[in-house]
Image: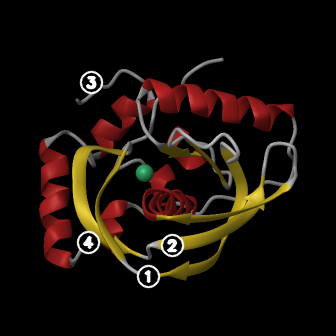
């Protein structure tokens, strides 16, 4: 098992739409295992494949507690949403920052697990938030896309000041030699 370098803001892989997974094979299982290692190492709560540079529709997560939940969801689909909830949301690909973002409070998602079995999960609050956040990553959407124009402008400036979002910074990080931010 190995850990990946998490791609950060400015990396073009984070703004692309990921492809459906067609084969759930040993390579995909290995990818999920390595993504979980990366998730625990960061640490974070959820990680989508594009965040490690892989354009596949899958994510891993761990909020602790419920062992019945799948740790990896493949080809997830948002079936239903309900309510509204504001929460200070962060992202491993936008390290060190968070913003209050309003999203639906409850969601129902379906998808496949690593055995290829269909999963159906109803979630609320933090887990519902996590699912929506990871689904966004699969569609090339980042936290910044949820901000109003002015806040987004400020965020971009902050990120540039932190050394993210320029082509040079992206290249440095993609080769794994970038400095890690707290
Ligand atoms: Zn994220």
Quick check: is the Cβ at mark 1 less than 8 Å away from ligand 1? Answer: no
Dividing the picture into quadrants, the one containing residue 146 is bottom left
Front residue of 150/163: it is 150
Q: Which residue is mark 1?
A: 83
Q: Measure how far apart labels 1 and 4 are at the Cα level.
A: 19 Å
Left or right of 95? Residue 32 is right
Q: Which residue is painted at 68% across and 51% down in the image?
A: 56
3 and 2 marks in contact (CB < 8 Å):
no
Q: Measure how far apart labels 4 and 2 are at the Cα level.
A: 21 Å
Q: Which residue is mark 2?
A: 106
First in sequence: mark 1 vs mark 4: 1
Dot 2 falls on a residue whose secondary structure is strand
First in sequence: mark 3 vs mark 2: 2
Task: Please provide percent x and percent y for residue 158.
Answer: 13, 51
First in sequence: mark 1 vs mark 2: 1
Task: Please provide percent x and percent y for residue 103.
Answer: 39, 74
Instruction: Give me the disc on residue 147.
Output: 4
First in sequence: mark 4 vs mark 3: 4
- Please name the colour scheme applied to the rendered image: secondary structure
Q: Measure how far apart labels 4 and 3 are at the Cα level.
A: 27 Å
Quick check: is the Cβ at mark 2 less than 8 Å away from ligand 1? Answer: no
Q: Measure how far apart labels 1 and 2 are at the Cα level.
A: 6 Å
Examine the rendering and report whether any part of residue 4 can be seen: no
């Amino acid at each position: 098992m190995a850990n990946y370098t998490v791609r950060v803001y400015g990396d073009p892989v984070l703004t692309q739409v990921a492809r459906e997974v067609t084969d759930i094979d040993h390579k995909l299982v290995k990818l999920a295992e390595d993504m979980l290692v990366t998730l625990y190492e960061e640490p974070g709560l959820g990680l989508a494949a594009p965040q490690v540079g892989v354009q596949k529709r899958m994510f891993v997560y761990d909020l602790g507690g419920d062992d019945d939940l799948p740790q990896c969801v493949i080809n997830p689909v948002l079936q239903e949403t309900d309510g509204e909830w504001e929460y200070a949301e962060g992202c491993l690909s936008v390290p060190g920052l968070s913003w209050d973002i309003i999203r639906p409070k409850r969601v129902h998602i379906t998808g496949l697990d690593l055995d290829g079995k269909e999963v159906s999960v109803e979630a609320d609050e933090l887990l519902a938030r996590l699912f929506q956040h990871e689904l966004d990553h699969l569609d090339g959407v980042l936290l910044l896309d949820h901000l109003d124009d002015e806040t987004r402008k400020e965020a971009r400036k902050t990120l540039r000041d932190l050394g993210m979002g320029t082509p040079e910074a992206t290249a440095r990080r993609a080769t794994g030699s970038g400095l890690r931010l707290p």
